Structures are given as C-alpha cells and as structure tokens.
C-alpha cells in the first residue's frame, strides 16, 4: 500500500487525484490537501467580472467531488516538507500536524507577488480570484469616462485574460470609444511573442486590437503604480482611471528549502514531471519551472503525465510518460476576431493559428463541458 499525497486542489491537483483514483485500487491511499474547499475554474473569471456567469457556476465543492472518488480531502495548508522523514506538515481546519507520504505531488499553483510592484495592492485591480473579479466588475459598472489600462507586469505569465478583458471592455464602451471619451490601452512587459512563449500571434492579435480601437504598448516593464499613473523602468508614465493588471508570478517559497526550486521559487522538473533531486516527488501546474505562459490545459496535461508515471512506479515499472510543452488556447474576442493558437513552446514544431467567431463559441462549449465532467 502506498500513501500518495497531492498538495493543491486546482487544475493540476484535481486531475492528478482523478486519474490516480480511477486507476488504483483501494490498497492505495490518495490524499489531497488544499486550503480552500472550493475548486475555481479560473478561465471563466473574465465572464464573471462582466456578469455573464455566476460564481456558483464556476466553483464547486472539492470535498464532495473527492468523496465520490474515494480520495481523502484535508482542508489545510502545507507548511513544510521533511524529505528524509517523508512527511508534510499541514495546518488548517481539518488537521494540524504531519502527514506521511510515499509519493508526493506538488500542485500548489503560483503565488501572486504583488509586493514586487509598488502600489499594486492599493491601485490595481486583478482577476485572479472570484472576489477580485467581482470587485473589478463593480469598478467597470461604475466607470463612465477616462483611460482604461490593462496589462501584464514583468513575470505575470497570463496574457489571455488581459486580451479578453480588453475586447469585453471595447464592446461595453464602443460608443464612448467612438466619441473619444474612453480609451483602452493594453501593455506588455516585453514583445507579444514573448508573452505567448515565442509564438507569432502579432498579425492576428494586433489587427483585432486595431479593429476595436485598443492601443497596444510593448516593452513596458511596470515597476510602480500610483493613484493615476503606471510607471515603468523605461520611464513610461501612463495615465489610468481604471486599471487591471496581472501581477508578477512566483512559485511557492515554502518548498525553497528542499533545494528543488529555481530563483523564482518554481519547482524544477523533468519532462516526466519528476522533481529534480527529490525521490518519489512529482510536480504539475503553474508551480513548475517551465518557460512561457501558464495555462490550465498545461496543468491538466502535466497532472495526467505525473499520474501515469506514478501508476508505473506503483507497478514497479520505470516511469516513461513524457510531457510536451505546448500552448493550445483561444482568445475570445467576442466575434470574428477570436483566435485559436496551438504552438510547441520547446521546439516550434507545432504552429497553428486560426481566427473566427467559431473559436469563441468552441471555448465556451469546451469550458462548460469541462466543468460538467469534473464537478
Ligand atoms: C482570469 C484567468 C483566466 C485564465 N484563462 C485561462 C484560459 O483561458 N485558458 C487556460 O488554459 N488557462 C487560463 N488561466 C490559467 C489557469 O487558470 C491556471 O494555469 C491554472 O489554474 C493552473 O492550475 P494549478 O492547479 O497549477 O493552480 P491553481 O488552479 O491555482 O491551484 C492551486 C491550488 O493549490 C492550493 N494551494 C496553494 N498554496 C497551498 C499550500 N501551501 N498548501 C496546499 N495547497 C495550496 C490552492 O488553494 C489551489 O487549490 C486563467 C487564469 C486566470 C486567473
């Protein structure tokens, strides 16, 4: 019998638990630890901010879901891992103390390093949570005239919701933009290709922005935000009346002392999702130190690979499933400018880009089906 401990209840943790529960017998104990009892379907947070969905439709109860799978759920937070004793210290509503494990899966997602940009907390909205998205939605509803600024801070590896928010706002304020009383700017810390892991998406995306009179600025590494300006290390001063930014991402400092992280606290893994230099340890999702943007579909595929390799270990076989780092995403522009991008980040071997209303619809259907199948 093996104790498999999954730390984190987001896309990576949930999918790892599902795959393992479906393929192992009752002789193995699977435990998932997460501080929050709710699973949040982050890709729908833009819709939530714009009142197109309800929070109940995009969250569900993890404990109920995991009960059905015979996976033990512990509401709690990892404090530290003792690798020689193979224990994880947990604190939370369900327990305070050490859990033993034979195999551990790190799936705790990213940390929002808002402290890296002075003034972020005070003056910027973000979309990385149900409450934050609702608060931004309220600010949009109260907004009448002025300059809207949306963007990504250095290290904020999430360009899609920024683009989708810009298109949603351009639809909402179409008349005001035409009349010149509202402007929308989108800012990136580097090039558009850098934001999308090297993929050439600028022709389609820039044309879509231009059609909706959205201005795009590149090479604006934000270092400071004041009540009315966004300031970059390149001396840009950009006025804002409504501001929504993706903050810098970092991994989780609580695993730093295990010697498994890079300089930004992301966990180093090989393509089998095995943690570098730590036996019987896997990692998946936003927490891993792979290059490029971070997407839910990557977290899901990484979790599937980790689960397949754990199953091999349980059978005494050598783990052999390999993960391929690719982007497969849709930027829903709410009409014919919607873009589908499929791109191989590591080797450029895959590059497909399509455009049309179909892709926005396909994303909506895909997301609904995903939520229905996993809740
Ligand atoms: C607004 C928005 C829009 C997005 N749009 C898209 C999109 O269109 N397409 C797409 O593919 N991706 C999209 N993403 C990205 C996607 O949501 C992430 O890539 C995905 O959530 C990563 O999954 P994860 O499991 O690694 O992390 P998360 O989903 O963040 O889950 C991390 C889990 O770890 C838990 N945790 C944290 N700390 C601890 C601890 N100390 N101990 C135990 N548990 C802990 C958390 O509570 C949570 O349960 C979007 C994200 C946002 C915010």
Image (cartoon, grey):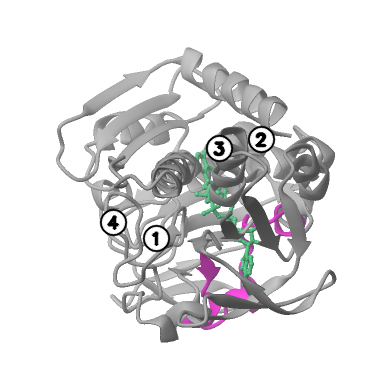
Give coordinates of residue 362: x percent, y percent.
53, 18
Identify the mark nearer the N-term, 3 or 1: 3
Q: Relative to the observer, which residue lies in front, 291 or 194?
A: 291
> Mark 1 — residue?
288
Name the image quarter holding residue 337.
top left
For this view, does 195 lie left or right of residue 129?
A: left
Q: Does the segment drawn in magenta span residue 123?
A: yes
Give coordinates of residue 314: x percent, y percent.
45, 48
Disc 3 secondary structure class: helix
Give coordinates of residue 135: x percent, y percent.
76, 57
Q: Residue furthest bottom?
A: 257
In this view, 158 is above or below 164: below
> Mark 2 — residue?
172
Q: What residue is shown at x 42% (from left), y 33% (from top)?
A: 329
Badge 1 crowding class, 10 Å Cα cut-off, few under 14, some 14 to 19, many 20 or more, is many
Mark identifier at residue 33 = none
Q: What residue is shown at x 64% (from left), y 52% (from top)?
A: 30
Q: Relative to the observer, which residue lies in front, 267 or 44?
A: 267
Badge 4 crowding class, 10 Å Cα cut-off, few under 14, some 14 to 19, many 20 or more, is few
Identify the mark nearer the N-term, 3 or 4: 3
Q: What residue is shown at x 71% (from left), y 48% (from top)?
A: 71
Name the image quarter holding residue 50.
top right
Q: Which residues are magenta?
A: 110-133
> Mark 4 — residue?
291
In front of the other: label 3 or label 4? 3
Quarter of the image with the N terminus is bottom right
Cα–Cα span, label 2 and label 1:
37 Å
Report whether residue 169 is seen. Answer: yes
Cα–Cα span, label 3 and label 4:
25 Å
> Mark 3 — residue?
19
In front of the other: label 3 or label 1? 3
């Amino acid at each position: 019998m093996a104790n498999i401990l999954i730390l984190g209840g987001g896309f990576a943790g949930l999918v790892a638990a599902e795959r393992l529960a479906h393929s192992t017998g009752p002789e193995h104990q699977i435990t998932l630890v997460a501080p929050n009892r709710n699973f949040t379907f982050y890709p729908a947070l833009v819709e939530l901010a714009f009142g197109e969905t309800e929070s109940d439709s995009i969250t569900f109860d993890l404990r109920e879901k995991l009960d059905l799978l015979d996976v033990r759920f512990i509401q709690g937070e990892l404090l530290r891992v003792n690798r020689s004793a193979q224990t994880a210290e947990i604190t939370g509503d369900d327990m305070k103390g050490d859990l033993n494990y034979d195999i551990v899966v790190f799936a705790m997602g990213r940390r929002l390093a808002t402290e890296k940009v002075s003034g972020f907390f005070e003056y910027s909205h973000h979309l990385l949570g149900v409450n934050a998205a609702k608060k931004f939605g309220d600010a949009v509803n109260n907004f009448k005239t002025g300059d809207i600024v949306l963007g990504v801070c250095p290290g904020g590896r999430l360009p899609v919701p920024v683009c989708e928010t810009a298109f949603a706002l351009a639809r909402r304020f179409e008349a005001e933009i035409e009349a010149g009383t509202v402007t929308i700017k989108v800012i990136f810390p580097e090039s558009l290709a850098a934001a999308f892991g090297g993929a050439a998406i600028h022709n389609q995306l820039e044309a879509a922005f231009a059609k909706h009179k959205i201005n795009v600025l590149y090479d604006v590494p934000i270092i400071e935000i004041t009540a009315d300006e966004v300031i970059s290390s390149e001396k840009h001063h950009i006025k804002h009346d409504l501001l929504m930014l993706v903050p810098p991402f970092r991994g989780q400092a609580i695993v730093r002392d295990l010697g498994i992280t890079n300089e930004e606290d992301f966990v180093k893994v090989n393509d089998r999702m095995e943690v570098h230099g730590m036996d019987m340890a896997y990692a998946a999702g936003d927490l891993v130190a792979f290059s490029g943007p971070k997407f839910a579909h990557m977290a899901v595929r990484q979790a599937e690979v980790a689960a397949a390799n754990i199953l091999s270990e349980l059978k005494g076989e050598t783990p052999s499933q390999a993960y391929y780092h690719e982007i497969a995403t849709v930027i829903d522009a709410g009409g014919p400018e919607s873009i589908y991008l499929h791109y191989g980040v590591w080797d450029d071997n895959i590059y497909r880009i399509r455009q049309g209303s179909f892709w926005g619809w396909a994303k909506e259907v895909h997301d609904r089906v995903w939520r229905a199948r996993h809740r």
